[in-house]
Image (cartoon, helix red, strand yellow):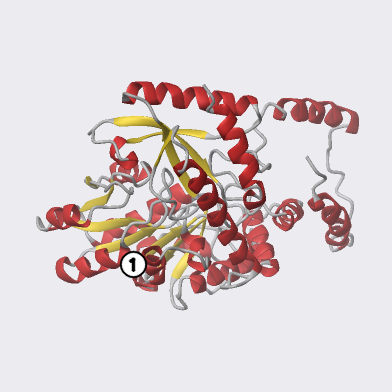
Amino acid sequence: MEQDPALELLNEFLPELQKSFTHLPAAGLEASSLDAMRSVLAQTASRMADNYPYFHPLYAGQMLKPPHPIARAAYALAMWINPNNHALDGGRTSSRLEIEAVREIAAMFGWTKFLGHLTSGGTFANLEALWVAGQLAPGKKIAASEQAHYTHDRISAVLGLPFVGVPADEHGRMDIAALETLLQSGEIGTVVVTLGTTSMGAVDPLPQVLALREKYNFRVHVDAAYGGYFRLASNLAPEVAQAFARIHEADSIVVDPHKHGLQPYGCGCVLFRDPAVGRFYKHDSPYTYFTSSELHLGEISLECSRAGAAAVALWATQKLLPLVPEGEFAAKLSRGRQAALRVYQKIANDNRFLPGPEPQLDILVWAVKADTLEESSRRAKEVFDRAASQDLHLALAQLPAKCFGVQSDGKVTCLRSVLMKPEHLEWADEIWNRLSKAAEI
């Protein structure tokens, strides 16, 4: 593992931050001895070594992308203050930086008037979006694709809202005909459209869902926790690009900066097209909202304490890598998709495998060819283990057999790879070589 530039940056700028407070009288703060802390940190480093190398391109399994060095440095720098972005007197500067950073994310989706803030992650961001949806359509059902993230069903249960799953096609996308059949009951108040499922990277047909909204009058929530930043990518298939081009027509959007946004966990973001939904957050606090006459982040969030350091890291990253088409950030997203397509073509041309759908973003899935689904699942696990023995770390998923061209209503355990690091493009051939060797019988 190479030396992280964040350490050099932190050593350079932390003293500058500390100088800002040297005028304060000595406080005699209690601190543990350096030797005791060194001993504990040595144990911590030893324990943390028992991990997959998430930072390396040969880790191509789950959706884990290392934070950018500027994000690491800015987060650590902010932690010397440890701001809380719930109230202005707990996070003065970090609150302003959050507002600026969220404004840039909203602009990426084409919104200049909106309500939004950061959250601890995509799950809570989706909870807030569906909570608002429930306030606007009390008791009505939430509908999402069967390939949508499982938390939508769970969140709906937490909110006391009925949930219905919409069948998905062989590409992992929401089946529009099945959705319309469900809408005819008049019981659905919100449709969750996933732009980038976490299982297959599938992009639901947002334009067709928007057309149905004109007919059936429901709320559209876009869960772009994984795929949202691909709004900037330049090499999407036409139908996928069309879905992202119309994301601004949604009623709410969720995106996770701690996925493709190069941020540490946890950093999610929820956005609402109509700022007036802020009225649902209204509450009384005896002590947190009296340092400013302006509406503060804590008054438009269900979460109370929130890490100001996450906002600082995000702001710094977006200053270095602006969220603009054709920029450096966008180009690196496109490289991930290019890597996925390259490995996919090699898999599709190898008769040992059954390729899934062509990657719509940077996730690809494939099954191992066998006479039965059970045998295919067993072999996939063997390939997974043999690949890991070569330091190639993939993932396993259980998906409908129809996604691999198999005429069956059953499911099969398949191999899955997330090529979300820009370096994956340079490593695509090496990844394939190790995968091919792992599949040798």
> At label 1, which amino acid type do we have?
Asp
Residue projecting furthest to the left: 185
Name the residue rendered at 86%, 53% in the picture: 8
Name the residue rendered at 47%, 60% in the picture: 228
Q: Position of residue 245 (x, y in %)?
A: 40, 71
Of residues 50 and 81, the one nearer the viewer is 50
Name the residue rendered at 53%, 50% in the picture: 340
Q: Compared with residue 134, is residue 56 higher up or lower down, i.e. above or below? A: above
In which quadrant of the rendered image does the N terminus lie?
Answer: top right
Q: Is residue 196 left or right of residue 21?
A: left
Q: Position of residue 145 (x, y in %)?
A: 28, 49
* Numbered-mark total: 1
Q: Secondary structure at mark 1?
A: loop
Of residues 77 and 259, the one nearer the viewer is 259
Residue 104's quadrant in the figure? bottom right
Q: Compared with residue 74, is residue 406 higher up or lower down, i.e. above or below? A: above
Of residues 204 and 224, the one nearer the viewer is 204
The residue identified by callout 1 is: 251
Of residues 239 and 294, the one nearer the viewer is 239
Q: Compared with residue 211, is residue 65 higher up or lower down, i.e. above or below? A: above
Residue 74's quadrant in the figure? bottom right
Q: Position of residue 124 (x, y in %)?
A: 44, 49
- Crowding at dot 1, Cα within 10 Å, few <14 / some 14-19 / many 20+, comes out as some
Q: Is residue 173 left or right of residue 423?
A: left
Residue 393 appears anywhere in the view? no
Q: Position of residue 117 (x, y in %)?
A: 50, 62
